[in-house]
Image (cartoon, helix red, strand yellow):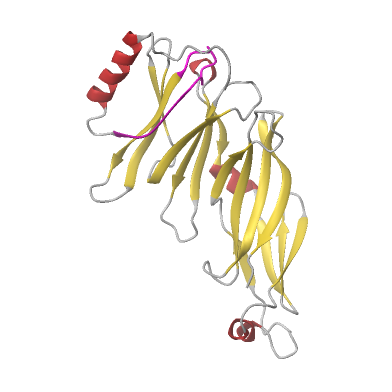
Amino acid sequence: MKGNYDDGRHHGKEQVMFNYYSRTTMNLHSMVSFARGDVTGDRVLDNVYLTGIKTPASPFTQNITLNVQDGRTGEVKSVPLRENAGYNPTIFLGDFTGNGIDDILISIATAGSGGIMYHYIYSFLENTPQLLFDFNIYNEQYQYVVTYQDHYKVEVVSEINNKKYLIDISTRGAGYLNEIYDANGKLKSPITGFVNPLSGLYPVDFDSNKVFELLAYQKIAGRYNADSLGYVLNTLGWKDNRFVLQNQNVAIFGY
């Protein structure tokens, strides 16, 4: 964010308050991610951080909580997360709505074999937390049907926009194909695959207008999770007070 911001260096009282808060209220909770930016909209940089309880001898973190300290007043507001346990929790600050104010993207990795991630985006305009993106709602909205076809094809249907994609798997190894197809390329029996929930959400300013879009990754799997076929890549942009689908692509693995 550009502009005439007060970076807080002349607000010693607020910095002392932040240090005091860190010492007195985080005896059990550790700070696990930190960023600075104007998320309240008053053109003063705020302290934005995640706290959580770390597991001894493990990178696993529980009770992950979003905290915002107002850079002007020193007041701290905490927002508990619905899914609040995982690995490597991180914060990214950027404008996703086009109002010129930073929003807060939270990312938390899970331990699942599918590389599933938890993602939230919060606005904190005027010190009021508002949830803009919830990965659970995204996963409910973006559903797919994956079906093996004759002659070494897999069809992927995206239900939200009724788009169909065909993945050619003819270059897979003979051992793999012989388990599924007969000598004439016909399916021995019906097979369905699946698309994993959200496994990555990345901020990208595609049109260089200083407003970030979201690039969402979901893995396409065949008979089992390790049978990876590719990814569905959805680009989401803010419109009419929600994130909507702008573009959709399917990226496939080469064999």
Q: Nearer the viewer, residue 14 or 242?
A: 14
Q: Quadrant of the N terminus?
A: top right
Q: Nearer the viewer, residue 35 or 126?
A: 35
* Figure quadrant of residue 149: bottom right
Vertical placement of residue 34 versus 1, above or below: below
**Residue at 33% across / 48% down in the picture?**
60
* Figure quadrant of residue 36: top left
Location of residue 63 in the rendering, given as x and y in whole percent from the top left corner = 34, 38
| Callout count | 0
Q: Quadrant of the C terminus?
A: bottom right
Q: Is residue 203 left or right of residue 109?
A: right
Location of residue 125 in the rendering, given as x and y in whole percent from the top left corner = 54, 19
* Figure quadrant of residue 156: bottom right
Magenta-highlighted residues: 30-45
Location of residue 249 in the rendering, given as x and y in whole percent from the top left corner = 71, 53
Location of residue 39 in the rendering, given as x and y in whole percent from the top left corner = 51, 21
Q: Is residue 87 left or right of residue 200?
A: left
Vertical placement of residue 142 versus 227, above or below: above
Q: Is residue 210 left or right of residue 51?
A: right
Check residue 46 for magenta coloring.
no
Vertical placement of residue 248 versus 246, above or below: below
**Residue at 43% across / 51% down in the picture?**
110
